[in-house]
Image: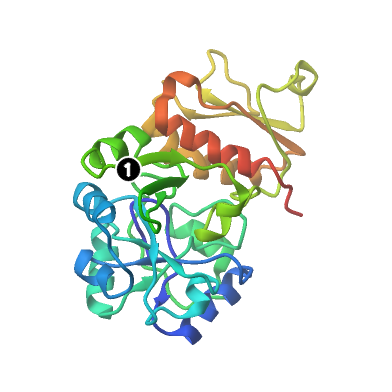
Amino acid sequence: MPTETVYGLAANALDARACRRIFTAKRRPANDPLIVHILNVTAARRLADFPAPARALARAFWPGPLTLVLTKKSVVPDIVTSRQSTVALRSPAHPLARQLIALAGVPLAAPSANPFGYVSPTTAAHVLDGLEGRIAHVLDGGECGVGLESTIVDVSQPGRAIILRPGAISAGDLRRALAKQGLRLRISTARRHAVLAPGMLPHHYSPRTPLTLGRAPRSARVAQSKSGVIHWRKPACPRPTDAWLSPRGDVSEAAHSLYAVLRRMDVAGFDRLYCERAPVSAGPLGEAINDRLTRAAAKTRR
């Protein structure tokens, strides 16, 4: 199913057998939990405890690209949460995702609809590239608007809120929404938090072609080079081996196109890819782009 972030592979979140088919189709390890998609706070309360900070964040950002990690209720199967006491919940904004949830009448567990660890899908064609033959249907909602996975915030413990994964909703946005809650927002880089929600592994979102962050060395830019180069903005004199995230360096456009560009360059026959990081001036969304690129460059998929 489409969402405003990326396409998700959906199953009834209350049916352990159905959720197990997600893991099988994606070849996903059982220790990586799923995000559960619901329509609203009322639906969320049936699945998890919903303290005041969660209510404040939901009022500000749901429906939208924000996932909340909360203490789960027993109705949520263990397979969804990797046998942990918390569950990750999100209310998507995409109209087709919301229509599907409403018609299904159940919450939908839906990690990204791609083979585990590979570049996330932002079109229906991307989904079929990786999962055709393993799934029965794709609901085509066009290109995803945001193009990056949701911001994830852990609000499962009293007195604290921790950003586990950056996204389109920035730390500043979150702090403003939490201003009256009397708690401090922290940004976590600790590996012990990685299992609370998906997308937190140090290597993820990876093309099969080896990826190096930073500008390509001159030796890699010779004529007929087998190295592809992804620029932040369009070069003045682009080469056939060049691609770019945004012609003018617009951060929203770069986030929207990131995964499509990575996929296109991954199948172009290069031996290695180089990709420029988002500049500091790109702000919080640029930080989210760099988070995905860092994880994408941390592992080579064969």
Residue drawn at the location 61% of the way across and 72% of the way down:
30
| Mark 1 lies on residue | 183
Horizontal arrangement in the rendering, residue 108 relative to residue 55 (left or right): right
In the rendered view, tell whether residue 229 sits above or below residue 192: above
| Residue placed most toward the observer, 241 or 138 | 138
Name which residue type carries label 1. Leu
Extreme-right residue of the structure: 219
Residue drawn at the location 65% of the way across and 25% of the way down:
214
Rendered image quadrant of residue 94: bottom left
Q: Position of residue 155 (x, y in %)?
A: 37, 54
- What is the quadrant of the C terminus in the image? bottom right
In the rendered view, tell whether residue 21 sits above or below residue 179: below
Q: Position of residue 117 (x, y in %)?
A: 62, 56
Label 1: state its secondary structure: loop
Extreme-top residue of the structure: 236
Q: Is residue 223 visible?
A: yes
| Residue placed most toward the observer, 9 or 90 | 90
Rendered image quadrant of residue 291: top right
Horizontal arrangement in the rendering, residue 117 relative to residue 10 (left or right): right
Q: Position of residue 72 (x, y in %)?
A: 39, 71
Q: Position of residue 267 (x, y in %)?
A: 65, 47
